[in-house]
Image: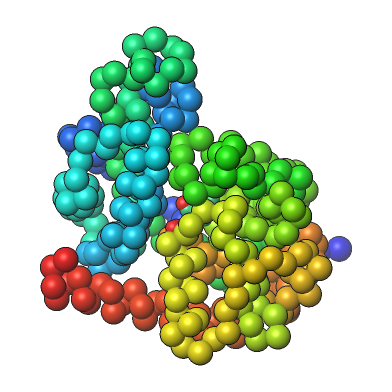
Amino acid sequence: MMPPLESHSTHDAEDDPRNASLQIFLNGSLVPREEARVSVYDSGFMLGDGMWEGLRMYDGVWAFFDAHMDRLFDSCKAVSLEIGMSRDEIRRALDATAAANGMTTDAHCRFMVTRGVKAKPFQHPGLSRSGPTVVAIVEHSKPVDSLQSRGIRLATVPQVRGLPMSQDAKYNSHSKLNCVIACLQAEQAGADEALMLDPHGFVNTTNACNFFIVRRGEVWTSTGDYCMNGVTRQKVIDLCHANGIPVREKNFSLYEAYGAEEAFLTGTFGAQTPVAEIDGKPVGEGIGAGPVTCRIRALYKDLVARHVAEIKATGT
Ligand SMILES: Cc1ncc(COP(=O)(O)O)c(C=O)c1O
C-alpha cells in the first residue's frame, strides 16, 4: 500500500530563516517580531472584532492594492471601525515595513485592524475607546512547490457558509471560526482543506480560498453569494471573459464538482492552486494542474506583470 501523502495547506510557504527576525508594523512603529505584542484587552484577541487583508508584493508593487483597500474600507465602514489611516498612509506603512525587512518581491502581508484595546473584558464595542490596533506582518513568502505539483485534497464538510444576515462571508474578519471549524473537519477526514457548501447544498468555497471547476471546457464558480469576494476570484473571471474562456458564476452541486475535468482554488497567496481530489475522488488525472488551469495561471502571471509595470510607470 502507498504511504499516505503528507498533508499541506494552501498557504504553505518555503521555510525562510529571515522570517524569524522580522520588523513588524505596530501602531505606527516598526518593532522587532519578538517585541510586537498587543494587549490581552485587545478587541481582536477577545472577540475577533477586527478586519484584515492579505496582500502580495511582486517586484516592489503591492498587487491590486486598490481592490484590497476597497474591500477593507467597505468592511470597516459596515462595522463602524475607523482605521485612522488613509489608503496612501497604509501603502506607505506597507512599503516601509517591506523596506525595513529588505524585501522587494515574494513578500506577503497580513494587514490587520482591530477595534483596539477595551476598557473592560466585555463585548460592547463602546468599551473599545482607545482607537484601533493596526498591525502589518510582512513575511518572505514563496508558496511550496508541492501545491502545484500535487494539488490540494479537499473534503466536503458539515460546516456551511451562512446567510449574509448572520455573518456575511464577505467580512474578512479576525474571527474566522466558521472557516477554522471547516478546516478541522476536513483535516479529521484526512484531507488538506475543506470544501464548503452554501445553505442550499450548492458547492460554494473552501475555508481559505475561492473554488472553481472546469467542466466540458467551461470554467464555473459559485454565484458569489456566500463566499469571500476574492480579489483573485474576480481577476480570474475577468481574464476568462477577456480571453474567450467560457466562464459562469452559477449554482452547482457536488455531482458536477465530482465530474469536473479540473478544479482549482484562487487566493492572493497561491494565485491558482490545483485541486487533486474531492472526497477521495480524483479530479481529472488527480495530480497537478490541468490545461485550462495552466492557461489561466499563465494569464494571471502576465496580468500581474502588466499591472506591476503600469504602477511603476505611472507611480499610482
Ligand atoms: C475565506 C476566504 N476565501 C477566499 C479568499 C481569497 O481572497 P483573495 O483572492 O482576495 O486573496 C480569502 C482571503 O482572504 C479568504 O479569507
Name the one closer to the observer, 97 or 75: 75
Image vertical order of residue 186 relative to residue 63, above or below: above
Is residue 3 left or right of 171 when viewed as pictured? right
- Give the image location of residue 291, x and y in percent: 60, 85
Residue at 59%, 70% in the rendered image: 249
Which quadrant does the C terminus fall into? bottom left
Query: Could you tell me residue 49's position as x and y percent?
Result: 43, 30
The count of marks equals: 0
Quarter of the image where the N terminus is located: bottom right
Residue 50 is left or right of residue 21, and the answer is right
Q: Position of residue 67 (x, y in %)?
A: 34, 60
Colour logic: rainbow
Instruction: Tell me where residue 3 appears, x and y as whole percent.
Output: 78, 59
* Residue depicted at x 32% and y 46%: 73
Q: Give above or below for 128 relative to 5.
A: above
Nearer the observer, 308 or 242: 242
User: Is 153 placed above or below 287 here?
Assistant: above
Work out whether residue 101 can be spotted: no
Q: Residue furthest bottom?
A: 244
Measuring 51% from the left and 35% from the top, which residue is drawn there?
175
- Res. 78 in view: yes
Answer with left or right where residue 156 lies relative to residue 33: right
Residue at 13%, 68% (x, y): give it: 315
Image position of 111 (left or right of 290) = left
User: Which quarter of the figure has residue 292?
Assistant: bottom right
Q: Is residue 276 above or below residue 294?
A: above
Task: Identify the residue at the far top of this view.
Answer: 120
The residue sitting at the front extreme is 165
